[in-house]
Structures are given as structure tokens and as C-alpha cells.
Image (tube, grey):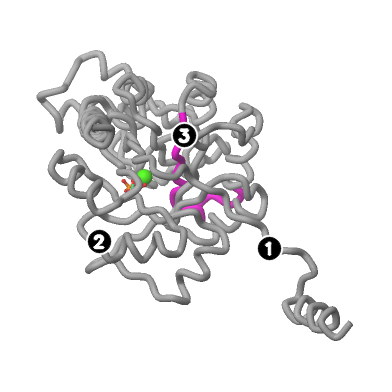
Amino acid sequence: MKKMMVLLLLLVSSGSTKPPVERASLPDDQFLVIAHRGASAYAPPHTLTAYELAINMGSDYIELDVHMTRDRKLVAMHDSYLTFQDTEQAIADVTFNELQLYMPGEEFNERNPRYASPIYKQLRVVELEDILLHFGDSVNYYIEIKSPHAYPGIEKELLHLLRENNLLRGDDVIPKVIIQSFNENSLKAIFAMEPSIPLIKLYSFDKEAHLSKKKVQQLKEYASGVGVNVDSVTKKFIKSMHKEGLDVHPFTVNEEKLIRKLMKLGADGVFTDNPDVAVRVKSEQSSLDAD
Ligand code: G3P
Ligand code: CA
């Protein structure tokens, strides 16, 4: 009786009688190749071409940054502001149709003469919905909510699209969808509405990666792992995250040597513009492990 009273008092003092909701889990012992903005070393980022290439290369996930236009369309692109027609404009202030004036292929061709192609000039910014319709459940999506403060309600819109496309079934060996953000509140909003999706909190550290004990405890209430800039990652950090049940996905890792090193350090995957390289390294390592 006394024990029951203590339990009751604890629950009342914690402000809730509900048990805590479990975080979603990520696959054990699988090094994930996350195609950063698609196979963006070889084709214009965030375009269907870059995503198709990434899938053909054997990536485990295609990575998409999402923003919301003035007419509330979710679009795959990196920056919150774009200069087109000689004017800098916020994505939040333009409609999807207006955004079609921007040509991602032109920028790619200028910056990457080796992989440039005249065909890329035909590419345009794509709606997330069209990407989901195009690939369906044949691929896995690693979606970043960018600048959520600029797009009130983006979390709800995103979940709506994922549900409509039947991507939250939860019966897959590796999760069909992972959601990432630098914004803690945005991830918590997703967790409150749909705790079945693994969430990755992104960090960019100036020095060696480190999170205080208090921060880690807060993270563990909703996140399944962290995404961190690769130059900050240490073995000690990866070990400390693993001890707390959190996975580590460094970004952005394009060099073969570095991918090998991170695998040895115990990273759980990498964001990469060169998924072909990461897939090859992963496969070579699997062969070695099998011997
Ligand atoms: O999402 C991980 C990494 O992509 C974050 O950096 O600027 O490339 O979106 P960014
Ligand atoms: Ca990103």
C-alpha cells in the first residue's frame, strides 16, 4: 500500500499519469549510406536525377532538405533564400510556380564542369510530394526539416504527406523514414505527433563534439541519434553516444579514406555526396568481416 502511494505521488509530482513514450529504434550493426541531397557529386542536388542515381548506386537512404513555399508546398532544396532573376528571395515568400524559374542545373554545371550536362538545364525544384510519388516505398527517406521557424506547421504538413503515401507502416527492416533537424522543437513536435519515426538531432561543433550529461538525457527523450559535422567527430564521442543508445551519423563525408576511418571508429553511417564510394567501402568491409 505504502509503495503504491509512493508511485502515485511520483506520477502526480511528475505531472503525468502516462508512461513515457519509447523512442523509435535504428537498425543495429548496419552502416548506413545516406546520399546527401542525392548523389550530389554527380548531378544537381535535390533533383530526381540525383536521387535516381543515388538509388542506382545502392544508397540506403536518400537525403532531402525540405522547405515550405508561400502556397504551403514542401520542396526539396538546401537554402532558405535563393537568388533568381537577380533578386534574393526567401522560399517562404515565393510560390511553387515562381520557384520554377530557378534552374538548379545551371549552378551545378558551372561548379562541376567534369559532370556538367546540357540536359541538367531542364531540371527544376521538385515538390516533396512528387518525390514520394515517384519513388514510393521502394526507397528510404532521410528528411531534414530546414528553418522550421520560417514555416509554421511544416511538421504537420510533412507527416500528412508521409501518411498519405503510406510510408509510416513501421514494418520495415530499416525504417522507411528518418527525420533530422538542427531544431530541437521541430523534432519534439514530430515526436509528439508520430513517435514511431526515428529522429536525428543535428549539431555543428566548432571543436571536438561533446554533449553534456543533461543535454544527452534531454535528447534521449525523443531522438534516436545525432548527426554531426565530420571534423568534430572523435572515437570518444561515438562511444559516449553509443553508451546512451544514440547513433552517430557524421556529415558530409566524401573521401574514401575518411569513410573507412569512420567505420572503424564505430560511426553508424555517413552522409555523403559520393554514395558509390561509401557503398563500395561498406561492401568491402562486409566481405572482410565475413572471412
Ligand atoms: O543533414 C545533414 C547535413 O546535410 C546538414 O548539413 O547543410 O548539408 O543540410 P546541410
Ligand atoms: Ca541536410
- Quadrant in which the C terminus is drawn: top left
Helix or strand or loop: what does disc 3 sit on?
strand
Residue type indicated by callout 1: Pro
Q: Specify the farthest residue to the bottom.
A: 2
Q: Are marks 3 and 1 in contact (CB under 8 Å)?
A: no
Residue under the point 29% across and 52% down: 266
Residue 66 in sight from this viewpoint = yes
Where is residue 5 shown, x and y percent of the image?
A: 85, 83
Residue under the point 13% across and 43% down: 257
The region drawn magenta spans 140-153
- When the figure is inspected, residue 172 is found, relative to residue 237, above or below; the finding is above
- Quadrant in which the N terminus is drawn: bottom right
C-alpha span from label 3 to label 1: 27 Å
Residue under the point 31% across and 27% down: 103
Helix or strand or loop: what does disc 2 sit on?
helix
Residue type indicated by callout 2: Lys
Q: Is residue 21 magenta?
A: no
Residue 161 in sight from this viewpoint = no
Which mark is first along the chain, 1 or 3? 1
Picture quadrant of residue 144: top left
Residue under the point 41% across and 64% down: 243
Where is residue 30 shown, x and y percent of the image?
A: 38, 40
- For label 3, the residue is 141
Return the residue nearer the eye: 145 or 188. 188
- For label 2, the residue is 235
| Image disc number at residue 20 | 1
